[in-house]
Amino acid sequence: MNSQILHAKLKENFGFEKFRPNQETIINTVLSGQDTLAIMPTGGGKSICFQLPALVLPGITIVISPLIALMKDQVDSLKANGIFACYINSSQSSEEQQFYIDNLKSNRFKLVYIAPESLSYLDVVFNELTISLIAIDEAHCISSWGHDFRPAYTNLGYLKSRFPSTPVLALTATADKATRTDIIKQLKLNNPKTFVASFDRKNLSLEVRPALDRIKQITDFIEKRPNESGIVYCLSRKTTEELADKLRKKGILAKAYHAGLDNKVRAKTQDEFINDDCQVVCATIAFGMGIDKSNVRWVVHYNLPKNIEGYYQEIGRAGRDGLPSETILFESYADVIQLQKFASEGLNADVQLAKLERMKQYADALSCRRKILLSYFGELVTENCGNCDICKKPPIFFDGTILAQKALSAIIRLQQSEPLAVIVDFLRGSKNAYIYEKNYQMLKTYGIGADISWYDWNQYLIQLINLGYCEIAFHQHNKILLTPFAKKVLFEGEKVKLTTVVKKVIDKNAVKEEKATVVKNSLFEKLRRLRYEIAQEEEVPAYVIFSDAALRQMEIVRPMSDEEFLLIDGVGKVKLEKYGSEFINAIIEFYKSKKSSTKTTKESNTYKVTLELFQNGASVQEIASKRKLGLSTVVSHLAKLYVDGHNVNLSQFVSAKEVARLQKAQTVLMNPNALKPYFDYFEGEFSYDKIRLGLAVIEKNNKK
Ligand code: ADP
Ligand code: ZN
């Protein structure tokens, strides 16, 4: 289909300006009647690939999905866009199910979502429907190769036999080849076209931290992000509960979620999270499968995951709306030992251990982490990503030969019979009971590394293990053994390169200050509250009304008319009609009240911090990343500071000539208080930041 028409449909029905990678080609293939296998990462935008064809094609599209909660979500989202859709699954009473089945015959619905278990109910109406497309979501569930095999999926092959001329679109985020081939075979796809989108999710930042003081680190992290939803994944049920408890004591709305909890409790927690009533969920891996929440802003791994597939899927639950989102993985030596034990005792021990090893290599990486992740999924990347901790702060190497010699000879002195903690105690000359009991204080070289902290020694020893000079015997009380390579360091003069130990310093005052300002100030917060109220009224998750990305755009563009509002990504025809006036009014009001109100101390504080950094020569980017603010927020700070008479030199951002041109535009524009009209007037020549700062200069001149 003509690209212009497809784009128009995308905007009108879903409010999006552009297709994400592969969406348009997949849609065209589906529309041409061909069977298709689409592989896209979580958050890549799979749904549009069948939802848009469903609107264009004459009959109904059947969507098979294993996740009951997700069905309701997707149907709510479709309805919010004015698209007729329904779902049929076991969460409904049989009357309800019958009601929808009867209604399918009326041809009102464009899409019906159905669980594979309920598919047989449709049998009675199949012959009366015009089925134009069958979409099979989470198609990897059909394969016992995949990681969440579902028996009910194995029957789906009959669909192709029954409707040989109806195209089938299979979708999944699982990339591995065996699963792919299995999907095609079992669904009996006819000469399908396969599309594999890049697995790169550039908006997710990647970071690994040593598991030191995890709870404090996590608390500080969350306190800096008071309204941001996030998930903390933990290995054990017990940890989820303990952590949630501790976070609650700090005043954070956190709940535990794991398979041992009552169904009702779990469903409630999930609902609250989806509806922004619960900020943080501390979960075992069971959580997140069935949710489509697009504004999960961060994911933390409290423990090391078992493998990279699982890890990538879990961090993938952050930032589906495409906005920058953060991920942190805490790596601990104790976790590695425990996971190694699990893996070696479970099924397929060799494979599981190898997978764990890859996971560990990722966590210990000394080069761009994203490269490692993507290469795991078979993508070759040559550029460093710039959005992982290694790229942002490359490790510093030093000659650690002497340190290595001290550590390795300590292991020999202790006869390769002690775990890491004892070796560190020995090196540091600790006077504890165990050391004395064993008389280790009598050995030569006891206390030879007393000048290095306990924590640093731990890190160095872990590096030596990773470098292969020693290893953990995890079935023999985790004692540390030397490998044959240790000889080279001890006796053959081999040099050892270690990296310096980085500690994250957390500035408490900065945390408090950010916390106060983020909540109070922004238009975003005001819009978020409005969205929450509407969502409560309509009983749908907030992101069904608008995504965070849409609200952020509103904050920057400040739409003050229907026309401008329609330009926001995520605003289609129906949403403009439904919500346009409320949001536009909120924006207009916000700027009115901003003008008249006097500023509070807290407000002025945040500006002061920006001012100080700026006057010390920091660039806008540096201030933004340091303060974890958006670039546009920093720009707006500068604008305000300038208007308030502070010494801020704006000429590097906007020239006098440009100011003059803006001033001229001001006299002819209908709505000179918004930024968008200027943007359009200059046909994109002036960025929003430039316009904002230019207007500040004008405002200041008018004051004089
Ligand atoms: P997946 O099923 O692949 O995990 P979804 O279909 O749920 O991903 O899409 C993820 C998010 O991206 C949703 O919030 C969706 O509205 C948004 N999205 C999808 N396509 C586009 C697009 N072309 N432009 C902007 N946002 C999009
Ligand atoms: Zn990187």
Image: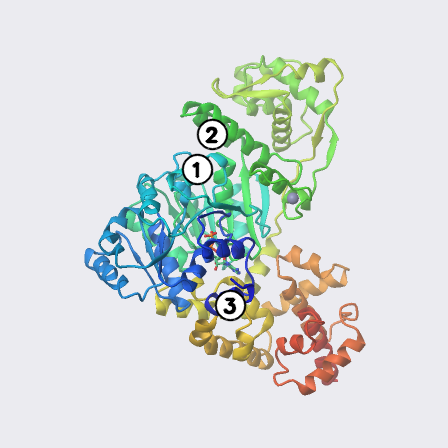
Residue 147 seen in this snapshot: no
Residue 595 seen in this snapshot: yes
Q: Furthest residue to the front? A: 165
For badge 3, the amino acid type reads Lys
| Residues at circles 1 and 2 in contact by the CB criterion of under 8 Å | yes
Measured along the vertical axis of the image, is residue 70 above or below residue 605? above
Measured along the vertical axis of the image, is residue 655 above or below residue 349? below
Q: Position of residue 117 (x, y in %)?
A: 28, 46
| Image quarter in which the C terminus is found | bottom right
Sequence-earlier tag: 2 or 3? 3
- Label 2 sits on a secondary structure element that is helix
Name the side, left or right, on which 260 lies relative to 297.
Answer: left
Q: Residues within 10 Å of mark 1 (few under 14, many from 20)?
A: some
Disc number for residue 11:
3
Name the side, left or right, on which 252 lies relative to 403.
Answer: left
Q: Position of residue 280 (x, y in %)?
A: 44, 52
Is 367 in front, or is 129? Answer: 129
Q: Residue at x 63, y 66 (%)?
A: 633
Q: Position of residue 410 (x, y in %)?
A: 64, 17
